[in-house]
Amino acid sequence: MPSVEGGGVEKNFFIISNYLANKLDKVFLITAENNLSKKIKNIEIVYPRSNFWRSKARFRKYIICVFLLIKILLRNRNILVFTFQANLYAILVCKLFRIKVISRSNSSPSGWSKNFIKNYIYKVGLNLADTIIVNSIEFKQEMKKKFSINATHIYNPLNKNEIIKLSKKKVKNLFPKKTLKIISVGRLVDQKNQLTLLKAINIIKNLYTVRVVLIGRGVDFYKIKDYIKLKKLSKIVKVFYTPNPFPYIKQADLFILPSKYEGLPNVLLESIVLKKVIISSACPTGPKEILLDGKAGLLFKVGNHIELSQKIVFYIKNKTKCKKLLNNSIKKLDRFDYKINLKKYLSVIKKKF
């Protein structure tokens, strides 16, 4: 895991890694980060000593981690490699050393390169892995269709008790009374598409009393702030980052996910745990699966801010119906239980050793 950036992928990585460390004889973590000792237990962390490799550039981190992987494989061939990131690099190295490798893909191929040559490289490279793990059924279907890969589907491990515990931390109430309280959590990048949400809010801002909280950080921060300023939304929308968004999700009425693509968005599962009605884009992959094709939450077409504004108005006028959708989503949460899905990870690994 070369680059740890604080998103949903990293949450899954820490949960899975710590579980495996308690079940296997020896686990190494290869990363470019040097500050993970508090989050990783019983794992030997292998990382570069120079700060040069801890720049913001992912590619630089990938290169040094490939080098560190090669050093380990030169000393010990009795190893199974499990790659969460820089998957193609790790797979190719493992095949050169005749080492078994499991690759976990995190987000839908719909968000990968549109370039034919790159897609061909993905197809050839990923098929070299001994096992490909994906986190939703729709994702598995996409991998089969696009890359002829028979992936293994394992849902993200969801720890409901931990989410509820973290949500109880006392924080400032960001939402005034008698307002529609909307929250969205995700990296501020093109994939997460927060501008679609802001455009929808701009349509209804003079019709309803709305407050919006965006929690995240990323390269689109200034683009988002500029839009807020341009449309005079500063009194309606707050943007900030916190590693624990759960107390703020707990304050909200409505969680909105406007993403262009996902894998299986943790934040939707976490919001259901905290009993929030969800409006999500029907993006590939995950939201439709979590929300039972609209029977457990409201869905809108990716990028369609007009339809999103209509869904928000539907929630305002039909809260009882939306509450029933929420109850449907809560009833189906057990399929994401972390104990069930962590055992599946261990089973896959034991089969390959």
Image: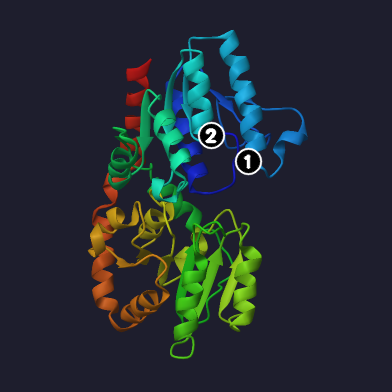
Residue 280 in view of the camera: yes
Please say if the residues under marks 1 and 2 sit with CB atoms less than 8 Å apart: yes
Percent across and percent down for residue 343 are: 33, 30
Splitting the image into 4 quarters, where does residue 345 fall? Answer: top left
**Image label count:** 2
Q: What residue is shown with label 1?
A: 58
Percent across and percent down for residue 311 are: 34, 76
What's the amino acid at mark 2? Ala
Splitting the image into 4 quarters, where does residue 125 fall? Answer: top left
Percent across and percent down for residue 302 are: 38, 65
Percent across and percent down for residue 306 are: 39, 78
For label 1, the SS is helix
The C terminus is located in which quarter?
A: top left
Q: Which mark is residue 270?
A: none
201 and 165: which is toward the camera: 201
Task: Using the image, determine if residue 237 lies above or below residue 99.
Answer: below
Q: Dot 1, crowdedness within 10 Å: few (<14), some or many (≥20)?
A: some
Q: What residue is shown with label 2?
A: 86
Distance Cα–Cα, label 1 vs label 2:
9 Å
Splitting the image into 4 quarters, where does residue 330 fall? Answer: bottom left
- Which is nearer the N-term, disc 1 or disc 2? 1
156 and 189: which is toward the camera: 189
Left or right, residue 45 beside residue 254 = right
Residue 276 in view of the camera: no
What's the amino acid at mark 1? Arg
The residue sitting at the bottom extreme is 206
Q: Dot 2, crowdedness within 10 Å: few (<14), some or many (≥20)?
A: many
For label 2, the SS is loop
Task: Using the image, determine if residue 81 lies above or below residue 145.
Answer: above
The N terminus is located in which quarter?
A: top right
Task: Name the residue at 39% across, 57% down.
Answer: 268
